Structures are given as C-alpha cells and as structure tokens.
Amino acid sequence: PHPCGLSVCLLFLCVLPHFTAQLKVVGPDHPVTATVGQSIVLPCHLSPSLNAQSMAVRWIRRHNTETVHQYEDGEDLYVEQMREYQGRTELSHDGLSRGTLDLQIVSVRPSDDGTYVCTVEGAAGYAEATVELEVAAIGSSPLVSLEGYQGGGIQVVCRSSGWFPEPEVLWKDPRGQRLPSVSQRHSHDERGLFEIEHSLSVTGEADGNLSCVVRNSRLGQEKESSLHISAPFFHDAHAWKVALAVMMVAVLMLITDLILFSVHWFKTRGKILTGQGRNHLVAKGCFQRASALDTLTLLVPAEEVSLDPDTAHPQLILSEDCRSVRWGDTRQNLPNSQKRFDSSFCVLGRKGFIVGKHWWEVEGEVGAESHWAVGVARESLRRKGPIKLSPDKGIWAVRYWKGKLEALTSPPTPLSLSPVPKRIRVCLDCTGGQVTFVNADNGAEIYTFRSFPLVWGRICPWFCVEKGAVRLGPRNSTPHTHAPHPTSSPASEASCPSPDAPSAPLLAPAAADGQLSSAQTQGAASG
C-alpha cells in the first residue's frame, strides 16, 4: 500500500470515535400548542438515535432553570421537581432505548406556557435543545348587556371569561365598522384564565345590531355576540325625554292604582281577608307610592322563587328543593361555567324580572357567627373574581353581620333595629324603580333603595352566604292580613301579618355540627 494512503486511513480511524461520540439533541423547529386541560407531548430526541437509558435526562424551564422532570440511573427522580408539575409529567422509558426523550404533561395549565429545555448528559458529553409550548384556551361566548344611560348615549358592556392568552376584543357597529372601547378591565380567575369586561357608549348612529367579538389570536378562533338596539332607546338617552317618560308612567300608575283600589274597596271594605285572600299580600309595606297613593291597597301574589344551582359558588350547598342554601367549608367539584360565581359566595334565583311588582320572603340564621346578605341583583352581574357588594355594581341588598343588619350602600349604611329581624320580605318594584326590605314579623320598613337606572336588564333574587344558612319562605304561603287602623303609624300601616298570629319560623336553630337541622330538612321537603 502507498504510505500516504496508509496515513490517511490511520488518521480517519483515530478521528471517527470522536465524531460518533458527539451528543446532539433535536427539538421541534416550531412551537407546540396545547389547550388548557388536555395532555401534550413535548418532542425531543437524540440524533443519531442512541440508547439513552444510561444517560441523565432533565427537562427544565428556561426562565428559572428549575426541574420539570428528571431521569437518572434508570429511574425517575422527583426530589427537585417543581411543585406545580408533581403528578403531571411522564418520560417514556420504552422510548429511551431508541433515543426518544419526549416529555408528556397532563392537565395543561396556563402557567405551563413558555420555553422548556431538554438536556441530556452521558459519557459522551452534554447537549440540549429548546421546546416552545404555547398554551391556549377558548372562553365563553360574550355576554352583551345594556347598563344604563351615560352622557347622552347608552352604556353597553361586553363580558367573557375563560380565555388564554389575553384575548383581543373588538366592537362592531351595524355596518361592521370598528368602535373603540371607552373602558376595559382584564383579570385572572383562580386557574389563571383571563376575564374581560369592555364597555362602550353608543348613540343613535349605532341603531341596529351591535356586536362584541372576542378573539384568541394564538388559535385563530373567536366568539361573537350581538345586541339589537332600536332607535327608541336612544331617544330616552336625552334627559328631558326621560323626565317626560317618567311623568307619563307615574300618571298611568296612578290611574291603575285608583282603579284597583276601587275594585278592592267594594269587594273587601272593612273585612278581614280570609280564605283566598290569605294567598295574597296586602303590599302597602312593599309598594308605597307618593303620599297621595299611601292610602291605596294593592294585592300582589307572592313569587315562586327558587335558587339556581348553576350560579352557586362551589362552597355553597343547596337543598334538594333549591329553597335553602348554607355555607360549606370545602369546595365542591362543580363545572366552572360562565354563570357560576367563583370567588364571592353568591347564588341567584332561577327567575328574573324586568317589569312589574314582585315580593318573596327570606329567613336567615342569626348568631355571632352568621354572615349573609339577601336582595336583588342584575342578571348580568359579574360572576368571576371578587365582587363589590353595592348598587353601582348591580346589587341592592341588606346584610346580616356581627349580629346587626346593614344596607349594602357605598359605604354600607348601619341599620339600628331592635330586635334584628331574621325574616325579611324583599319587595321589588321594577316599574317604580325601587327595592324595599320589610320586617316580615311586624311589617316595619327596614330600608328602601330608590332611583334604579332606567335601563338595567333582568333583575334576579340574590343571596350571599359566608357563614350560616338562608332559606326562602314556604311556597303558596303568606302572612295573615288585616285592615289598617285609622290611627296606625306608617310602620304599622306597612304591616301585613297580624301581630297576634305570628308566622312559624322558616329556619330551626342551627345543628351542632353546622349542618342543616332536621326541621330545615322537613321544611325543604314540604316546600
């Protein structure tokens, strides 16, 4: 053989082991996308394919170099694993023999979003590759609602939740033109998903369908909801027209009440209501007008109110008949829908109201530990995250706390009542724009919220229980009524139940273990 050729061969044989011993780790050349809640595999492999069973494999987060998953000496090691990944990662041991270093992450969370580093170390050295994980989630369909008149226009609000990453929000007028939001609020829920609330002020030029579009640019998907606003709404946005409309409504109400009073007077004058009459409430304590109407008596049937379990906070426990609710110290595993309160311990009634007069009775547990509130709220009330309990946020209620009652104004108004009533009659007058709370035991007025916005949407019974329990009054049952005495005080005139025939309590004393008592259970069954 030629001496030069022999030298070249010897040199090649010496260098060959050096090249074959070099480690190379290969990851994907594009981001990996995963949806919240699903499982995802982060791909990574050795090139060329080598048996990695005797090597040390470690997946880390680039931003903090902490361990996501570790494999060494033929087994998985969890001592250094980040807490948020415990029980959610798996490295396929079968694939290691073929040089596959894929990492599976189950139940993907928004916090998993970001860059991962796949590292391997063996006798031949150290190598690594990066993998970009993009987490995404599609939220709920936007909820578009009218909030009231503002600055000569109508304030419209678009709400949606369950998005990741932060979504884009777009308003479109009837011609498809983009409209700017006048205010926007973004927040996170307990899972790290985004909640959005954008508001817009529209004028008569936007007569027609107004659309709110929420878009996830990462997935290229969007959800859209529309609201049709007709021209008469914009006419009402002018102050003088609002005043005229209010005056006309007041006149019509006066005429209606006079007619009803005349009919009632000829049927029942001077007589105590019996039989069928006891199925109605003499609602003077609930629905008082101006002084000229104070002598009118209006019969209003009680509402059949029940609780909506789809809106209840996971720590609220509802009875089978959905007529009572108590606070529990453990969070139930319930679907996190757009309707459900996830931070404030609230639940809405199933039934909502837009017009007319409505009333129902509620009884709450009283005691040093009890903490509850009852009243009404907008159906479009924010459900996700903490809620300020005040009229400007769409809640009109009274609260029992530390043995006392207070009206949830802003700030709260203490109510000096002795004794503190635990049976409360909630009287909603959508037409007159007010909510009155009445002591159901003696008919005395507790507090009245007046001057509701003219555009408020549907109003629902609202309950909040942070300690103790609250129960609705029995169905088809109303207190005894009596003819008012000529010299009665305003408080006694508001009285519907007869003082000498008090109604039975709706709630029995709390059981020692904090559960609903047997009396409550029987009441629920009978209701």
Image (spheres, grey):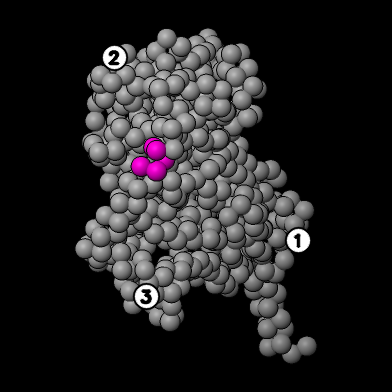
Mark 1 and mark 3 residues within 8 Å of each other at the beta carbon: no
How far, Cα to Cα, is label 1 from label 2? 80 Å
Q: Residue at x 72, y 52 (%)?
A: 92
Q: Image height check: is 185 above or below 18?
A: above
Q: Amino acid at mark 2?
A: Ser
Q: Residues within 10 Å of mark 3 (few under 14, many from 20)?
A: some
Q: Which residue is tagged 2? A: 418
Q: Image height check: is 64 above or below 448?
A: below
Q: Image height check: is 139 above or below 416?
A: below
Q: Earlier in the sequence, mark 1 or mark 3?
A: 1
**What secondary structure is the stretch in magenta mostly built from?**
helix
Mark 1 and mark 2 residues within 8 Å of each other at the beta carbon: no
Q: Amino acid at mark 3?
A: Ala
- Tell me the quadrant of the picture where the C terminus can be found: top right
Q: Residue at x 38, y 46 (%)?
A: 256
The stretch in magenta equals 258-262
Q: In what element is the residue under mark 1?
A: loop
As rendered, which of 27 and 274 lies closer to the eye? 274
**Quadrant of res 24:** bottom right
Percent of width and height locating residue 352: 49, 45
Q: Is residue 98 magenta?
A: no
As rendered, which of 478 and 210 lies closer to the eye? 478
As rendered, which of 383 and 504 lies closer to the eye? 504
Q: Earlier in the sequence, mark 3 or mark 2?
A: 3
**For residue 98, which numbered disc appears in the image?**
1
Percent of width and height locating residue 498: 42, 16
